[in-house]
Every structure is written in C-alpha cells, then in structure tokens.
Amino acid sequence: MSAISSSTVARDRVPGLDGLRALAIVLVLAYHLFPGLAPGGFIGVDVFLVVSGYLITALLVAEHRSRGRIALAPFWARRARRLLPALVVMVGITSAVAAAIGGDVLVGIGWQLAGVLTFSSNWWSIAQASSYLDQTSPELFRHAWSLAVEEQFYLVWPLLIIVLLLLPSRALRVALPVALALASAVAMALLAGDPAVDPAAASVAYLSTLTHGFGLLLGAGLALGVEPLRARASTRRPPAWMVDVAALLATGGLIALASALSIDAAATYRGGLVAASLLTVVVIVCLSHPASRAAQIADAPLPRWIGERSYGLYLWHWPVLVLLGAALPAVDRVGEGSWLLGLAALGIAVPLAALSYRFIEQPVRSRRLDAALGGALGWARPRRVALALGTGLALIGLTAAGAAAVVRAPAQSQAEEFIAAGQAALDAASGQPAPAVPLRVPMTERGPVPAAPTPLPTGDRITAIGDSVMLAAAPQLQARFPGIAIDAAVSRQMRQAPQIALALADAGMLREITIVGLGTNGSIDSATLHELRAILGPDRQLVLVSAQAPRGWIAGVNQQLVAFADDYREVVLADWYAAIAPRLNLLARDQVHPGSAGGAVYTAAVEAALQRLVDLPEPVDYDANPELHRPR
C-alpha cells in the first residue's frame, strides 16, 4: 500500500498486518473452495474491510500531520494504481475463457462488467435482484462486491476526514466513525431480518455499502484513536504477554466465528459480522504493541507471503472456481466433487496471484513500469517501444475479450429456461378446470383389499406444492398425472408449506393426496412438517420429495424428511435425491433444476412413492375386531 514517504511507511507500518490479511484470505478460500470446511469463512472479507479502513485512515492522518493537508487527486491515483491493473487483467482473461466455454457462465456478464470496472458491483447486483445467498448459479464476478464497497469508501472517506480533522476534540473524531459504524450495523440487522424467510432482503443488507460499511468505519475509528495509545509512556502499556494472550483469543474468536456462522443464519446479520470486525480491531491493537510476539509470528515469511498476495488470490480464486464448474458441469459440487474442484481452483489461483503480484501489481505500484517506459531505467529505445506496444496490445486484447463475452451471453440461464417451460405448462393448464373429487373414504371403513394391484391415483386426486424444481418438472408431472393441481413457485421454502396448504384447504382445492417438494432453498424442522400434517388431517396422504442441490443444508433437509416419513404410516418419501444423483447431467448447469429428461426422473420418483402409498396394507381396526390382539 502506497504511503507518503519511505520514512512514513517505516514509522506507521504495523508488523503482522500481512499475517492478518493471510488469515482473512485463507478463511475466504476455505469458504468458497471447500464447502463445509468454514461455513462462516466469509467473515474474512470483514477482516479485510477493517484492515483497509484502518490503513487508509492512518495514511490520510499521517499526510495531514506531515503536510498540513490531504492531496485528494494523488491519493485516488494511488488507489487506482493499486487496484485497477490486476483487476483489469483478471477480468479480461476470465472473460475470454468464459466466452470460450459459453452458456450459463455468461448470463448477465454485461452488467457484471459494468459493475466491476466502475467499482459499483454491489449496487448492480442489488438492482438485478442477484442474491448473494444463492450459490447455485453464481455470477463470474460476484466477489467484486467487496472491492466496490472498499472503493466507494476510498472515494468518500478522504472528504469526510478533511472535515473530521478540523474538530478540536480527538474524542469526537473517534466517536463519529464509531457512531456511523453502529448505525450501519443496526441497519443491517433491521434490513436483513430472517434470511430463511426473506433471503432477498438479507442479500441487500449484505451487499449494500450503507449496511456493510461498519468494518471500514471501525478500522477508521481505530486509526484515529491509536495515536494517543502510541504516545503513552511504555510503562503504561499493558505487558507483552497480556497482549499476546488477547491476540490469541481474538484470532481464535475469528476462527470460531468462521466455523459457527452461516450466510443464511440470522445471527450473522444480527451481530456475527460486527463481532468479526471487533475481533479484528483487537488483533490490530495487539499487533501494534512494540513487544508483541504475535506480530513476530504474523510477520513470518509464509503468512507475509500469502498476505502480500492476498489481493491477487481474492481476485482470481472465485472466477477460476466458477469457470471450472462451467467447464465440468457433470462434476458433483457437493462432497468430494466440490473439494476436488476447490483444489483445482486453488492450484490455478495461487500461481496466477503470484504472477500478478510480481509482474503487474508491484511494477505499477512502484512506478517501475512508468520509469521503464520513460527511459529512467536506462532501457534502449527498441526495448521501451516493445514494452509500450505489448502493453497496448494486451489492453486491446482484454477489451476484445470482454466484448466477446457480452456478445455471446445468452439472455437466460439453462435453469431459467427450464423453469420458464414449466411455468408455461402451468399457465396453459390453468384455464382447464379440474373436476372436484371427494376425499377418499378412510381406510378403516373400506372393504377387503382386492387381489389385483392397486392402480395409481389419477391426477385429479393430487395436489402438488413445490418450489422451482417442481416447477421445472411440471410438464412431466402433468403428462403422467393429467389433471394434477400444481402450485409451485421460485424460491419457496418448507416453512411456507403450512400456510399454502391451509389456503388451499380453505378454498376447497386441497385434494386427498398432497405432494410437497420444498427442501431446495433452506433448512427445515420437524415442527413445520408436523404443522403441515395437522392441516392435511387424517383423511389425506402426504408425499414428501427429497432435495437435490449443491448446498450445505441439503443433507440435513433429507435426513429430516426421511425421519418424518418413517414416523407416519401415510407419509412416504419420493427420493428425488437418490434418483438423480447418478444422472446429474440431466439437470441444468446449476445442478438443481431438471430439464425434460430430468423431469421424467423426478416424475418417476413421485410415481414410485405413490405406488408405495397405495400398496400399503389396510390398517387393522382393533375396536371393530376385538378378537384380534393389539400389539404391545
């Protein structure tokens, strides 16, 4: 990071910050590349934000202290040199690869490029209703949201610092950014609400600079407040061992948060991210102690090497992972398959980040490139001309790559096409009234079981409630069960099932067999299933459809569904997960939504469950047959 002068750098540099950056990027890599390893590893971004707010403010204060003013244009130029060159190269190369692969990875590439190159990706994502919580069809440059938040801070904060430094009271200077950080954190908690209920609101709260700016502001407040601590006599500082213990506890707290939090948990937005930011503040304070052994450890060669290249690692790891997933759509993105993709992405991203640091970031930041082109390095004219031509051609090629990606981008993803086809099938069927069918007579009042196999129920006896997966499979369900009533919509969750079923029952539209497929978009609990069964009543039967998606909660969802079906006689499981697992190529590239062939597999799983349901032996009515012995 650029500074005012070499002496200022030496005086203001906090040893160990590269090690803290290394911890931050390791958490982010663990979260993105190895699902389940660090469910809350996204807090690494918050660590970065605190460090950035601290360093930028320290540099601005140091410049004001040494020169009596802050030169805004040179400051912004340094920021551009630090961020833009490596970013432009990454965007151009990954856009070219994406254009070569084609398909879903290019959907929305136009607005993504506009957001990345103007450092407004977070606002573009919000405007496009792109949910950060949805990891099934991620954008190529989704990770650029945090760079946008940082750059927007770099643009506005120097202007505020100029005003802030006019305040006579140092306490007020510190209190203002801390108060703004508190307001930002409260706004996030209020806006996010419960992500399980409204993931779109939580995504907006996560991406917005206004609600996710508290880390930068806390870092800024720390930078404004540390000078008095440094000015104290050494005898008034806490002993080094106490500082090292605090650093160890704070670092352990960050690791614990990375293990405990999840992106779809309310606790993340109601204090979890703030806690990560505060722990980072504690670590920075501890590292600034002159006798801190923690700083020496964090400044060791390996963490320092990783920290210095953390920007490149952050830039490259995510697009590489997305491109690998697009190039290898048949690879399972849950379990071992996802970890193999992560290892491959890591093996590619690390050398790319190292090359970026060596040949792009450092030459531009240190102005060696300017010096070489201007002749200050003593290069011969032909060599300088070759360098200038090579740089120009590279920029042209990177621009052409972005343009090719935009030209080749499809209007919809494959999953969106499948969902649209399902919605069209439902719309076509909505004008055809289905006959009202009375509820099935309770089993205990039936006659003897016929010898012939029981036929499957017809569609006019079935109500299906589902999410976008069922919606994509709707044409195949309709073809197999003509007259079936399907109520399916995008982004539904199981917690909505009782309300939907109750509304259908009140309208007289809930038939005797109910199929529910609502496990894709979030975790479920047994209380919701019990509430749903109570609404259906004893005269209706329930088919629960298991879930398939490369999401962390799917295993828990399916375990809940299996356990509930095992507990009740007239509840059966349609095991969509097991049926499609060996045939993921029949799904869209998001490995969630079925096409026509996948829809046939979905329908077959439902059909098998219905067959088990109708083949159930009649229950014994012990009250009507006292001669039979009730099992004990």
Image (tube, rainbow, N blue to C red):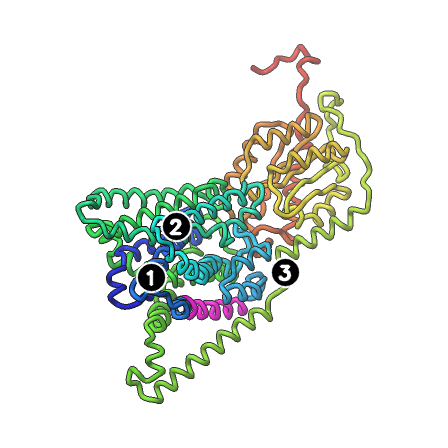
User: Disc 3 vs disc 1: Cβ atoms closer than 8 Å?
Assistant: no
- The amino acid at mark 3 is Gln
Q: Residue at x 52, y 36 (%)?
A: 559
User: Residue 493: horizontal and vertical position, in percent?
Assistant: 60, 41
**Quick one: SS at disc 3?**
loop
Q: Residue at x 23, y 52 (%)?
A: 231
Residue type marked 1: Leu
Q: Is residue 56 visible?
A: yes
Q: Nearer the viewer, residue 576 or 183?
A: 183
In which quadrant is the C terminus drawn? top right
Give the residue pinned by disc 2: 218
Total residue callouts: 3
| Coordinates of residue 284 in the picture (x, y in percent) | 30, 51
Residue 261, position in %: x, y?
44, 43
Give the alpha-carbon distance from disc 2 to disc 1, as whole Å: 16 Å
Label 3 belongs to which residue? Answer: 412
Q: Secondary structure at mark 2?
A: helix
| Residue at image location 33% in from the left, 63% down from the top | 64
Mark 2 or mark 1, which has the lower sequence index? 1
From the viewer's side, name the closer residue of 295 and 605.
295
Q: Residue at x 24, y 66 (%)?
A: 7
Binning the other alpha carbons within 10 Å of mark 1 as few (below 14), some (14 to 19) or many (20 upward) gives many
Q: Residue 308 bears which disc, if any? A: none
Mark sitting earlier along the chain (2/3): 2
> In which quadrant will I find the N terminus?
bottom left
Which residues are drawn in magenta? Answer: 82-101
- Foreground label between 2 and 3: 2
Q: CA distance from mark 2 to mark 3?
A: 41 Å
Q: Position of residue 587 (x, y in %)?
A: 59, 53
**Tag 1 or tag 3, which sits nearer the N-term?**
1
Q: Which residue is mark 1?
A: 59
Residue type pointed to by label 2 = Leu
